[in-house]
Amino acid sequence: MEVKVADVFECPQCGGNWIEEVQTNVVLSSEVAGIETEESELLYGEAAWDGGVVDRYQCSRCGYVLGSARTPEGLVAWLEKNPKGVLKWMK
Ligand SMILES: [Zn+2]
């Protein structure tokens, strides 16, 4: 079963309905596609990332951190306990 985050999450702090996963230790590689020579600015093309460790899940509007969840299972558990959440699909 698939649910939309907006249907199962309401931020306790701002009422927003968006969750983002924040990772650390990510290596980001960006193609240098062009150079603006007069300003010495680089123009970037495709980007790719590698590695990364989940640091936290948070409201993407206000930054409210969703407990100590560091895994998808932890996030689901937090949503089930969240007093303002409506996540009941597993019960
Ligand atoms: Zn929020």
Image (cartoon, rainbow, N blue to C red):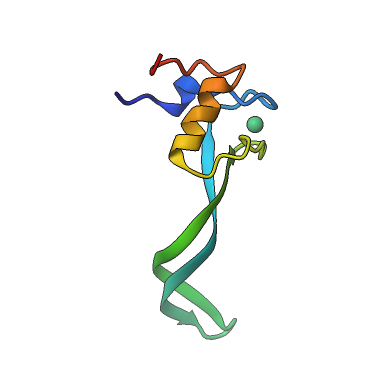
**Image spot of residue 29 (x, y percent):** 44, 72
Q: Using the image as rendered, state which of residue 11 and residue 61 is in the foreground.
A: 11
Q: Toward which corner of the image does residue 60 lie, by quadrant?
A: top right
Query: Whole-percent x and y of residue 61?
Result: 62, 36
Horizontal side, residue 2 vs residue 55: left or right = left
26 in relation to 11, above or below: below
Q: Residue at x 40, y 26 (%)?
A: 4
Quadrant where the image shows the C terminus: top left
- Where is residue 82, by image quadrant? top right
* Frontmost residue, 34 versus 87: 87
Residue 49 relative to residue 37: left or right? left
Rendering quarter of residue 40: bottom right
Residue 21 is situated, as x and y percent measured from the top left of the image, at 51, 45
Q: Residue at x 52, y 86 (%)?
A: 37
User: Foreground: 34 or 25?
Assistant: 25
Q: Residue furthest right?
A: 13
Residue at x-position 50% and y-position 36%: 74
